[in-house]
Image (cartoon, helix red, strand yellow):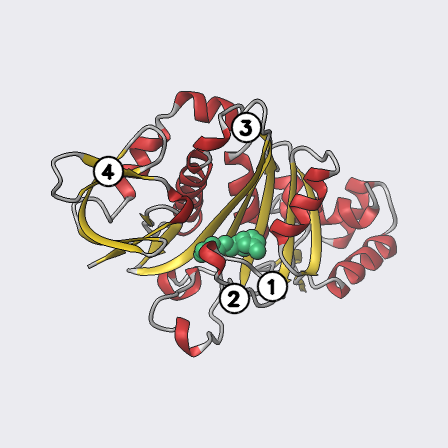
Amino acid sequence: MSLKEQVLQALLEGDTCSGEALAKKLGVTRSAVWKAVKQLRAEGFAVEAGPNRGYVLAGCDKLSAAAISHMGDGGYTVELHDCLGSTNDRAKELAAGGARKVCVIADRQEGGKGRMGRSFFSPSGAGLYLTLILHPAIRGEDGALLTTYAAVAVAEAIEELTGGSAAIKWVNDVYLGGKKICGILTEASVDFETGSFAYAVVGIGINVRKTVLPEELRSIVTDLETETGVIVDRNRLASALLRRFADIDAILRDGTYLKSYSERCFVLGQEVLVTRGTEQFSARAVDINDRGELLVDDGSGTLRALNSGEVSVKVK
Ligand code: BTN
């Protein structure tokens, strides 16, 4: 680890350290510590210093793989970019080349993708845009389980860091204060012969800071800062997510997260308008089954199971 990273680590541990104390701790000169602090500042870390206060890391807004790994990365290797077209596309490229347990993060995306061919607004400094490469031991046709788990993980991470209480709109949207705060896009390559995953990528976009939204998003989208007043450090948020994906197979085997998903899913019990390709029908959302599908009552006498793939649901 470089001296710069060691200084960052000491500051991330919450230490308020004088240059002298840091120099002693790390076995270097004060001027070497000062140079490391200067480098960290140049990289965007808000290292503050004051008389009788020593150095302290203020609300840190710079994404850093070292900071994430220090706070806990769940065993994922973080690949960080200032800008990508889409973290999902980069993750698929890596997965196709054999990468495992990698998390791709970008400060901004120029072609952020949503479900049903939509785009995902991803400006710099305002959100956390990340994609995990997974090799889950479930059948390819059960991919909705990954999206549903990711939604629970996001809701829990938001609650851990802000105290705000997050809800879920089946299948892939997390809501706070009645507006969308996060979208999830799961894509996969399934082995044709075995029906199992060659790989899956789970892309998560969380709106963190207040920003100027395009007109069409203003009434439906929000961010953590607006809803909770908390300015969340994106490194902490990434770590809170990655730790929740440390052992995805055990979580999927256990399956109890689906109860938490159902409890948070505000669509249940509501009249909804279902769109599947060119077909549209009204129904009442009744339950989530053990495959992460939405069970709806369309009045036909039999509940219909909606698989997330090609379906969108709107609360009436
Ligand atoms: C949706 O709202 O329909 C899903 C949005 C998913 C957005 C995330 S941001 C990180 C990852 N990269 C993408 O291009 N999309 C996902």
Query: How far apart are labels 1 and 3 at the CA level?
Result: 27 Å
Q: Secondary structure at mark 4?
A: strand
Query: How far apart are labels 4 and 2 at the CA level?
Result: 33 Å
Query: How far apart are labels 1 and 4 at the CA level?
Result: 35 Å
Query: How far apart are labels 2 and 1 at the CA level?
Result: 8 Å
Q: Which mark is residue 304?
A: 4
**What residue did someone put label 1 on?**
111
> What amino acid is labelled 3 in the image?
Pro
* 211 or 219, nearer to the observer: 219
Q: Check if mark 3's residue and mark 2's residue have beta carbons within 8 Å.
A: no
Q: Secondary structure at mark 2?
A: loop
Query: How far apart are labels 3 and 4 at the CA level?
Result: 27 Å
Marked residue nearer the N-terminal end (3 or 4): 3
**What residue did someone put label 3 on?**
136
Crowd tier of the residue under label 1, counting other residues whose Cα lies within 10 Å: few below 14, some 14–19, many 20 or above: some
The image shows residue 52 at horizontal and vertical percentages of 65, 59
Relative to 17, is 196 on the left or the right? left
Query: How far apart are labels 3 and 2 at the CA level?
Result: 28 Å
**What residue did someone put label 2 on?**
121
> What amino acid is labelled 4 in the image?
Arg
> What amino acid is labelled 1 in the image?
Gly
Crowd tier of the residue under label 2, counting other residues whose Cα lies within 10 Å: few below 14, some 14–19, many 20 or above: some
Disc 1: residue Cβ within 8 A of ligand 1's nearest atom = yes
Residue 131 lies, with reference to residue 135, above or below; the image says below
